[in-house]
Image (cartoon, rainbow, N blue to C red):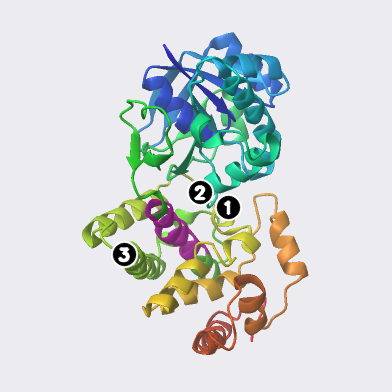
Amino acid sequence: MNKIVIFGAGRIGRSFIGQIFSRGGFDVVFVDVDQNLINLLNLHNCYKIIIKGESDESLLIRNIRGIHFKDTARILHELSSTTVTAVSVGQAALPSVIPVIAQSLQQRAGSDKPQPLDIILAENMRDAAGYFRNELTGLLGKEFPLSSIAGLIETSIGKMVPFMTREDLEQDPLQIFAEPYNMLILDKKGFRNPVPDIPWLAPKENMKAWVDRKSFIHNLGHAVAAYTGFLKHPGKTYLYEILDDPEILNITRDTMLQSAAILMQIHPGEFAMHDLMDHIDDLLSRFRSKALRDTVFRVGCDLIRKLGPDDRLAAPIREAIRTDLPCDKILHALVCGFYFRAKDEASRYHPSDLKFYGIYKPDIAYLLTRFCNFDPEKNKDLFLQAKEICIEINQKFKPEILIF
């Protein structure tokens, strides 16, 4: 049986990567820091996924086992007898995982006939391959044949994982909820071995375009709904609640369409508008799923990152300026983001948002410069438009925080 070693047995690791590889005929080995979870995986050698759609569907994922992250010897043993691994641990944990992978690559390179290891980077980060390449080169040295011994495969993770209550977890600590969507878009050029023959893999030649599609449409749509919806409905908890408002739904869709036009301009020939429109409508249907129970807080929080210069709102605006395309709707959503003050179910702000509020100044020019890296001289019209949006928001919604 083929085998994959997956670093991270969390939401994406189990509900998505582990699911599609197990169903595709692979033996799945999870590596995680949660000892109790590892013990349960090894006790049962399977776990249950509840597909949350119009009616729940249950899937039993078999042929799995687990290794604790501190058991380096066993991890290296499992990696030595496979050609594919995946990383889905979150950016904060990557500095711990990469040295283990580097050690495995070093062992692999020392064998008589080294076979490459393909590393699927199932992380929600831009230029994940570049980050891994730099880190691995720093550990292995510039002379190490990294490009031939390791495939660094970027992905676009479109999977959303439904919220689970404490009662859900207590009922079955191994079960995990998932939405029906199950397609993993990944970089075809990143593979050093043949792409695994699994129905749910969608290898792409121009991965940059598809990473941008995720950011400019999926991530942007999330941000537009959360930021504009919070201003109008600050008491709403769930994303589907604010998207039940036809005004917010239309604003979100129109803004996604404006960003789609920018996406097509910077990646000519890669996308057709009718396909992007279908994608947008499918996303909005998924955003509105009551089974998903996605919260406004989760979708909008982490403002320093999400309002940053290379993320879901500022990046398409910058491309629109460069290509002389309209971006007024996206700018409106970006300005709304500066007013975002949602809290989690325990009435707490996200730690990054607390930092944002600590350095916050109620001056739109300062915010656009400080967080988005726009130039007040080169982008003068943008700053004027943003100021007008602030005046409109202050008058219409009378928010807790006023920006001028």
Mark 3 nearby-residue class (10 Å; few <14, some 14–19, many ≥20): some
Q: Is residue 367 left or right of residue 147?
A: right
* Residue 162 included in the magenta stretch of the image: no
Looking at numbered disc 1 in the image, what kind of residue is underneath it? Arg
The residue shown at (35%, 50%) is: 206
The residue singled out by tag 3 in the image is 264
In the image, 284: left or right of 113?
Answer: left
Q: Are marks 1 and 2 in contact (CB under 8 Å)?
A: yes
From this view, report whether residue 399 is shown above or below residue 149: below
**300 and 157: which is toward the camera:** 157
Q: Earlier in the sequence, mark 3 or mark 2?
A: 3
Local packing at callout 2 (Cα closer than 10 Å; few below 14, some 14-19, many 20+) is many
The local crowd at label 1, few if under 14, some if 14 to 19, many if 20 or more residues have their Cα within 10 Å, is some
Mark-to-mark CA distance, 3 and 2: 29 Å
Residue 294: image tag: 2
Q: Residue furthest front?
A: 143
Quarter residue 62 falls in:
top left
Q: x and y percent of residue 278 in the render?
A: 26, 55
> Which picture quadrant has residue 369?
bottom right
The spot of residue 6 in percent (x, y) is 55, 26
- Of residues 214 and 194, which is closer to you in this image? 194
Residue 212 on the magenta segment: yes
Q: Position of residue 242 (x, y in %)?
A: 46, 61
Q: Which residues are magenta?
A: 209-226
Query: What's the residue type where badge 2 is placed?
Result: Asp
- Residue placed under numbered mark 1 in the picture: 298
Q: Main secondary structure of the magenta part?
A: helix
Question: In the displayed structure, would residue 78 be above or below residue 366?
Answer: above
Which residue is located at x 38 percent, y 76 percent?
323
Q: Is residue 297 above or below residue 120?
A: below
